[in-house]
Image: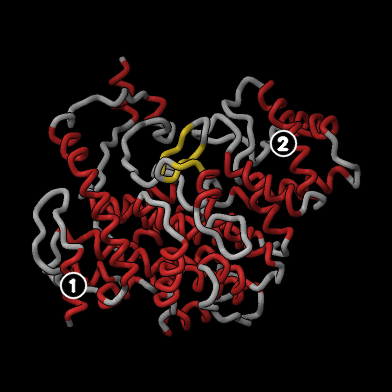
Amino acid sequence: AILVSVLKSSYIHLSYWTDASSIPAAWPPEAAFSAVVDTLKSKIQGLADKKAPQLTALRKEHGNAVLGETTVGQCIGGMRGITCLVSETSLLDPMEGIRYRGRTLQDCMDQLPKAPGSKIGLPEASFWLLLTDEMPSAAEVQALNEELHKRSALPEDVVKMIDSLPKETHPMTQLSMGLLALQPTSAFGKAYRSGTLKKTEYWVYTLEDALSLVAKVPLLAARIFRNVFMEGKHIPSDPSLDWAGNYAQMLGVSDDPLFKDVTRLYLMLHADHEAGNVSAHTTHLVGSALSDPYYSYAAGVCGLAGPLHGLANQECLRWLKNTKAELGGKEPTVELLTQFAKDTLASGKVIPGFGHGVLRNTDPRYTIQRQFAQDNFPNDPLVKLAEVCFQAIPPVLEATGKVKNPWPNVDALSGTCMQYFGLSQEDYYTVIFAVSRALGCTSNLVWSRMMGLPIERPKSVTLDWLSAKVK
């Protein structure tokens, strides 16, 4: 009882918008006895206390400051370039790429703790970074992994539901259904329905759900994979392994230790990409209505399933495979691929894996994956083809004068790296993306509730209104 009392009192602080002096109404029992969760909460609250004056000043003193103008083109063009979202966890620089709490991805690769014998920054360590703005210690990541394992078991009813689905049901459909089936376990939902939850406590219960969702999603995703592609023969979770390494082992497609590393790499690189992309924005939008993280991220996963968002990596792999087949056994060269690219564009087709809505340089996620591939399997035929494409295609795209960014993005190589180790089931690739993006989307939910961001409600207009406006 003394321990619980100490832990309870240790993180009740002032929040951004009002005083908080009472114990939360429906205290999550897992948190009360978890030192690492208490540490996370203390670090998040400490960072929030530092940020509070900045947020207060922006709201009270600069609320009417103009950030920019909105054009008709932006209004009917997907709102590209409109600055109107806040995301504390990451920021996308057009030249440097994504930064996790101000750190480049290469910084994360170098500085995040790693699994024994690995050179890859652990994705669950990036989760800690996104939440706290601190590089965790190896001991903190170990404690976090132990906490995630404690929370990872899937309820029996969820297992039965997933196992009952036809194999023909797309893996992303199954994943979104599984996340919704987990919603009754939501700590936030239960506390809100109690009628006594205060605004100052929203972030605490959102964090509880974020931790549990992140803990469970690898088991859910692995179960879907084994049901659809491996005749329902499952591999048990191994609590001695790290979060990402355990996921790789449960997939069971390769015993090569490098498969664990490529999984860790993929999950770390895809963890967050600020708030404007479809999955992150959808998660934030639904969460702004105070839907709990299970509802919110299930919606985000549905957005991720779209061909223009999460399916891009499998389309890139298919394009590489088709290109290799069309070459008819010829050794790929820059000259050969240059002409192939010109012919492809002349026929009205697109070349997937090149360009980006925001980036104006080579995607650093591509660069890091490329180095991994060159270090570990440079002679793989698709890796060799991708390398020649990297040299040949950007000049062709640049010469058209129509492409703002001719350089490769992360999708140009991610599927190729996975297929090398035997993960060739392309329909499953977006599920792996979703396992990774859960880290960033749920971290953002925690901070949205901490900052007290309101329900999102932009103004829409009609075409007639626009036409009248521009006269």
Whether residue 454 appears in this view of the structure is no
Q: Position of residue 157 (x, y in %)?
A: 41, 83
Which residue is the site of mark 1? 6
Can you say which quadrant of the picture contains the C terminus? top left
Q: Residue furthest top?
A: 471
* Distance between mark 2 and mark 1 Cα atoms: 57 Å
Total numbered circles = 2
Depth check, front residue: 131 or 441: 131
- Image mark for residue 390: 2
Q: Residues within 10 Å of mark 2 (few under 14, many from 20)?
A: many
Name the residue rendered at 44%, 59% in the picture: 137
Can you say which quadrant of the picture contains the N terminus? bottom left
Q: Earlier in the sequence, mark 2 or mark 1?
A: 1
Depth check, front residue: 57 or 65: 57
Please, what secondary structure does the residue beneath circle 2 have? Answer: helix
Whether residue 320 appears in this view of the structure is yes
Q: Position of residue 302 (x, y in %)?
A: 45, 57
Name the residue rendered at 57%, 67% in the picture: 245
Q: Residues within 10 Å of mark 1 (few under 14, many from 20)?
A: few
Q: Position of residue 252 (x, y in %)?
A: 65, 73
Depth check, front residue: 112 or 222: 112
Depth check, front residue: 299 or 449: 449
Give, as a three-letter code, the residue at label 2: Phe
Name the residue rendered at 39%, 73% in the picture: 181
Please, what secondary structure does the residue beneath circle 1 have? Answer: helix
Seen in the picture, residue 32 relative to 269 is either above or below; the reply is: below
Give, as a three-letter code, the residue at label 1: Val
Would residue 386 appear left or right of 409 to someone viewing this image?
right
Q: Quadrant of residue 12?
A: bottom left
